[in-house]
Image (spheres, helix red, strand yellow):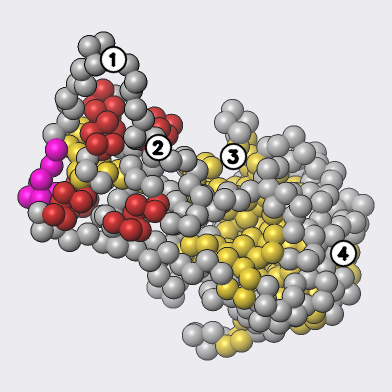
Amino acid sequence: MKKIHLVVASLFLSAATLSYAGGVSNTGATNTAPANTQEAKKPPISKKLDKADVDAILAKPSDYVLIDLRRPDELIKIGGFPVYLNIQSKELEQYLDYIPKDKQIATISNHAGRAHAAADLLIGKGYKVVGAIGVQDYEAQGGALTRITPPAPKYEVNADIPGVVAKGTKYEFLYEGFEGTEGPITLPDGSAIFTETRANRITQLKEDRGVSIFLQNSNGSNGLAFTPKGDLISVQNLKPQVGIVYPAGHEKVLSNNFEGKPFQRPNDLVLDKKGGIYFTDIGVIPKPEEKDAEAARPAVYYITPYGKTTRVINDLKRPNGVQLSTDEKVLYVADTANQYLIAYDIKADGSLSNKRDFAKLDGYQKNPAGEFASGADGIAIDAENRVYVATNSGVEVFSAKGEKLGIIALPNKPQNLAFAGKDKKTLVVVGRGAAYRIPLLAQGFLGRAK
């Protein structure tokens, strides 16, 4: 698969046949006022950059920020340059906080009209603007543009899974090139958000395929969960902890240690209806040269509704995804190193009993290091208590009794998944920097966001 290169640091936008969050700018509006009363058009403040200017900028990409003001169809048809931000003029002011003031900025459009308007706005806001670029003018002067190919919009499911998905069902391989992909969860409008852990942000995937920033500076959030009041809780890795990250003003640390020892690498979580939180800590394995480093402490913890952190599992090698049954009597845990998905019965106080192998994973394979692992990661559950697990083989689906129902194979290894869409009949899957959207016959559990 080819990556979408024209949007690098801040947000991805959809391709030619896709919707665009900002709509289409009406640059051809006609002023019907009589000529003698029409106000004279003011010349732009910003400089129009020629080929030599642009080549000098492209030669030092770390010194400049490029902002492209064109629609996705223009980007694909005409081409352009690798840029920092791709957005329409009408929405530029909404994203000023994401534009650095300590770097020189050049704006881009086809013939620099929209680019001049954006450049002048930024100059007025105190940004360091070197000028406006017209990509078609640059090309006419002998410059070479980068042209992108959107990913093929439809792929097909290769096998029937009765009640879940039919063979031949077309699904969307949306994009690849995200900076780490984890923690998808649905929003009330049916769209989904997921974490870009390496980029330290949470990204929104809209139903029209538009993609935008939901939250910047997420403290390396991974797994996500919503409270009934709409607070977004995440497990966080830059400063290992569990806490509320959204909305603004509600931020709060819920737990950052167990018995005085800080968490190592929190990974996934699920909230129960009592207000308790189960979450995994996959641990950090020291490198061979780190002889004095602390050993990994993989575990599963439970934060009680009263705020006390308890450890409920400490005998799994790589606890990763975690999920509750619809009646919240069973906790499922994906152990990346294990051949089986593990299940536990839940006691009244949130503690666990009756550990058992719930389902055998097809993804249990030898990895490049010569070790066997299933790659088991995120877990989702549908309204019929079927269990969906992201593994080395794809999305493995099991009945409520652990019977194997089938596998949804994907181009890239999946890492996490969630039901989304207004009817929760769309499975959003992320993994290895890619995002997919698969229409299902099955409906996700409506009793919680994930």
Mark 3 secondary-structure assignment:
strand
Residue at the disc numbered 3: 245
- Tell me the number on the disc at residue 34: 1
Residue at the disc numbered 2: 25
Disc 1 residue type (three-letter): Pro
User: Residue at 74% of width from left, 41% of height from top?
Assistant: 227
Closer mark to the observer between disc 3 and disc 4: 4
Q: Which residues are magenta?
A: 48-55
Q: CA distance from mark 2 to mark 1?
A: 24 Å
Quick check: 132 above or below 58? above
When asked about the image quadrant of residue 116, the answer is top left
**Residue furthest out toward the right:** 348
Q: CA distance from mark 1 to mark 3?
A: 54 Å
Q: CA distance from mark 4 to mark 2?
A: 45 Å
Residue at the disc numbered 4: 384
Does 210 sit left or right of 244 as displayed? Answer: left
Mark 1 secondary-structure assignment:
loop
User: Residue at 17% of width from left, 37% of height from top?
Assistant: 131
- Tell me the number on the disc at residue 447: none
